[in-house]
Image (spheres, rainbow, N blue to C red):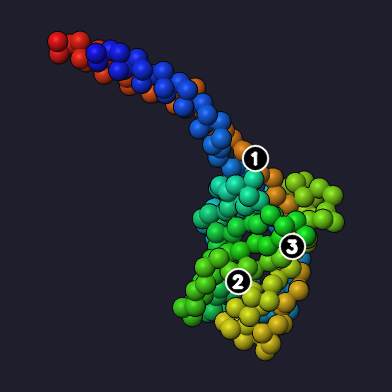
Amino acid sequence: MIRRVLTAFIGLTALFVPVTAANAAVLVGQTVVEPTFDFDSAGLTPSLLGDAGTTSEGYLSFPITGGNLGAGLIEHENSGVRLTAGSVFVDLENFLIDISDPANGTISADVSASTGAMVADAPVFSFDLTSVSDPFDLSNPTIELLFTAAASSLLNSVFNLGDPDALTGARFGFAATAPSEVPLPAAAWLFLAGAGALGMSRRKKAIA
């Protein structure tokens, strides 16, 4: 009886695992940004946070950590940018690119400040992909990133820029993103499930 149950379990696993694994994938890759904003004139100093880095071309680099290409979402957890003026700073972290509407793309971030202000998933940059010929070329970023009204208002509240709309529509820089889906190894899941069932069968025999 136990053997028949285990055989049936392995058979069901063989049917079920490839279907779920075929639809499951890990999103990886990299997004780069070439800043063009005049930070000096604004009295701001940028620096990198977490896993963010720089490429050989000098672009800012943010690892892609997940998301859903079908939904047009690209995640960048545990990396970000800090803007500093004297002893005051604002952190923009965990960027989420939303390209579900290519003409009205957004990048949101978790925003926190030394003053204690915090906003989750704030839309900080906007962009239009419809006029970009190759948004995936990491060696030539061409996606124009513009500060949103929300970002301008948040930064003004911390840095006292003099006008809540001082940065609205100002260009932060140019970006490129190259996400790729790595499917989960269906064969590995099937092997582990089968090996586990076989081990249970052998253990039952040993006890008997």
Residue 53 x, y percent position in the rendering: 61, 53
Q: Earlier in the sequence, mark 2 or mark 3?
A: 2
130 with respect to 6 (left or right): right
Q: Earlier in the sequence, mark 3 or mark 1?
A: 3
Quadrant of residue 88 within the rendered picture: bottom right
Mark sitting on residue 180: 1
Residue 122 x, y percent position in the rendering: 58, 69
* Of 175 and 68, the residue lying toward us: 68
Helix, strand or loop status at disc 3: helix
Q: Nearer the viewer, mark 2 or mark 1?
A: 1
Residue type indicated by callout 3: Asn
Residue type indicated by callout 1: Ser
Mark-to-mark CA distance, 2 and 1: 30 Å
Q: Nearer the viewer, mark 2 or mark 3?
A: 3
Residue at 42 percent of width and 23 percent of height:
13
Q: How many marks?
A: 3
Residue 93 x, y percent position in the rendering: 55, 62
Quadrant of residue 147 within the rendered picture: bottom right
Tell which residue pokes out farthest to the bottom in this image. 162
Residue at 53 percent of width and 54 percent of height:
77
- Which residue position holds label 2? 83
Q: Earlier in the sequence, mark 2 or mark 1?
A: 2
Eyeballing the image, is 192 above or below 49?
A: above
Q: Are marks 3 and 1 in contact (CB under 8 Å)?
A: no
Residue type indicated by callout 2: Leu
Which quadrant of the figure contains the C terminus?
top left
Eyeballing the image, is 81 above or below 40?
A: above
Mark sitting on residue 104: 3
